Amino acid sequence: MIKPRQRSKREPTIALINIVFLMLVFFMVAGTLAQPLDPELKLVKTEELDGIAPPDALVVHADGRLSYRGA
């Protein structure tokens, strides 16, 4: 008597490939729909601005010090 061959249970990967492909197409299209910035627009250079904490802020410094309201 010959035993029937048992097929190994494999998960279908084609559905996952389809989802990844659709997501890739979606993000490519969504990224191209955004309007480009106006070339005449002058952006602020934040490196030139002083970093001032708000008056009611609790500031934690790099060395672990705490300062409240600038004190």
Image (tube, grey):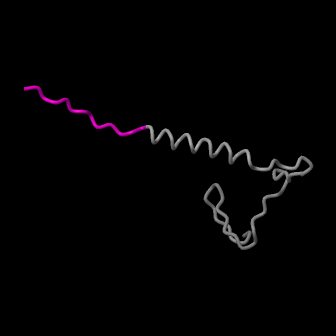
Query: Which corner quadrant holds the C terminus?
Result: bottom right
Place of residue 43 in the rendered image (x, y in percent of width and height, measured from the top left): 86, 52
Query: Which corner quadrant holds the N terminus?
Result: top left
- Toward the top, the furthest residue is 2
Q: Is residue 56 above or below residue 63?
A: below
Residue 56 placement, left or right of 41: left
Which residue does the image show at 75% across and 50% down from the upper left?
Answer: 34
Place of residue 33 in the rendered image (x, y in percent of width and height, measured from the top left): 74, 48
- Toward the front, the furthest residue is 1
Which residue does the image show at 12% across and 29% down from the upper left?
Answer: 3
- Toward the right, the furthest residue is 40
Magenta-colored span: 1-13
Q: Quadrant of residue 52?
A: bottom right
Q: Is residue 62 magenta?
A: no
What number of labels is visible? 0
Which residue does the image show at 45% across and 42% down from the upper left?
Answer: 15
Residue 47 placement, left or right of 11: right
Place of residue 55 in the rendered image (x, y in percent of width and height, measured from the top left): 75, 72
Residue 28 placement, left or right of 43: left
Q: Main secondary structure of the magenta part?
A: loop
Place of residue 59 in the rendered image (x, y in percent of width and height, measured from the top left): 67, 64
Q: Is residue 31 above or below residue 49?
A: above
Residue 49 placement, left or right of 26: right
Q: Is residue 64 above or below residue 70?
A: above
Residue placed most toward the observer, 16 or 53: 16
